[in-house]
Structures are given as structure tokens and as C-alpha cells.
Image (cartoon, grey):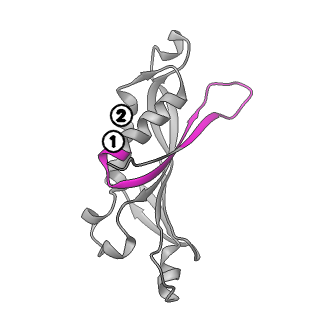
Amino acid sequence: MNCFIGFYGVHGTKFAKKLKDSAGKNLSIRSRCWRMLLLGMTGAPEHQIHIEQLEIFARVGVPEKERAKSQRLTASITIWPTRDIRELDDKIGRSVDYSAVCKATKKFARDRSDSLIETLADGVAVHLLESFPIRKITVELRKFVLKDAEFVSVTLTRNASLH
């Protein structure tokens, strides 16, 4: 499975780079922030990490029969890290490890049983906000259950609570 990972800035063009994940599968990475930095623009660049259509399995559906076994869903997740891009110093420990986000999302979904995809999406968002240095997150879950539609989806955005 290909997992598209993108880094987005406030302005700029896209740069792409092929990487392999821990299983040796190709990952595409795009970044817009670098043009902004190269052009010498001032101000803190706001960056996002985007995971596109991560394949997850969950028990979700209104009828009990639908929740009886796990079904395939996809999750697209956009993360706004808490740390400014200029503070990363090219060190993974200072960023949000998107591989760990993917694993946490899969495990969280696998261990649940929800009637609504809205409930599952909100649960994923809250779990990731509590588990990683994230200030804002958008989660889209796609479910493939209707014969006459490609998918049904829900998208929600949550901000980290200020403690």
C-alpha cells in the first residue's frame, strides 16, 4: 500500500521525494515550506503533515451485523505540529513521527467498536492529540459500504485543548 505523506507550508511550490517506509514500501513526500525558506520570506512558516488514505480496519456500523467483523476503511489525517519548523534541526525526535501516527491510528481503530464513523473519527483525533505533539488535527474517514457510492466519509477538525 502506498501512503502519501505531505508537508505543507503557507506558500510555495511542491517538492517531491521518494522514500521507503520500514516495510520497504514507497512513500511520497511533498513539501511547500522550502520555497518559502529559500525565498527568504519572514515569519514562522506554518507546516502540516498529511497522511493520505491510510488503510485501517475497524468494527463500525449501526447494525450489529455490520460491526460483527472488522471492515476496511481509509483515514486521511492532517496534523499541525506544535513545534515550529525552524526548531526541528532535521531531527525526527523534534517532529511528529508520521510512521508512529500511522501505527497508533491502526491500533486505536482495531481495538474499537463504534456505531458511527463520526464517533470513530473523533476518537482517532482525540487519541492522536493526546499521544503526539500536535496542536491541531483533521481526520477524514472513508467507509466503503454503499453499492451505489464509491464511499461515505466524515471529516472533522479538532484543536488541542489548552491546559
Magenta residue check for 115: no
Residue 72: image location, x then y, percent: 50, 31
Q: Residue furthest front?
A: 163
Magenta residue check for 147: yes
Q: Secondary structure at mark 1?
A: helix
Q: Is residue 5 above or below residue 137?
A: below
Judged left or right of residue 107, residue 146 is right
Residue 96: image location, x then y, percent: 34, 58
Per the image, the residue denoted by label 2 is 108
Per the image, the residue denoted by label 1 is 104
Judged left or right of residue 60, residue 144 is right
- State if disc 2 and disc 1 touch (CB < 8 Å): yes
Q: Secondary structure at mark 2?
A: helix
Q: Amino acid at mark 1?
A: Ala
Q: Residue furthest right?
A: 148
Q: Amino acid at mark 2?
A: Phe
Residue bounds of the magenta highlight: 129-156
> What is the distance, in whole Å, between disc 1 and disc 2 at their CAs?
6 Å
Q: Is residue 151 above or below residue 34?
A: above
Residue 81: image location, x then y, percent: 39, 60
Q: Residue furthest left?
A: 93
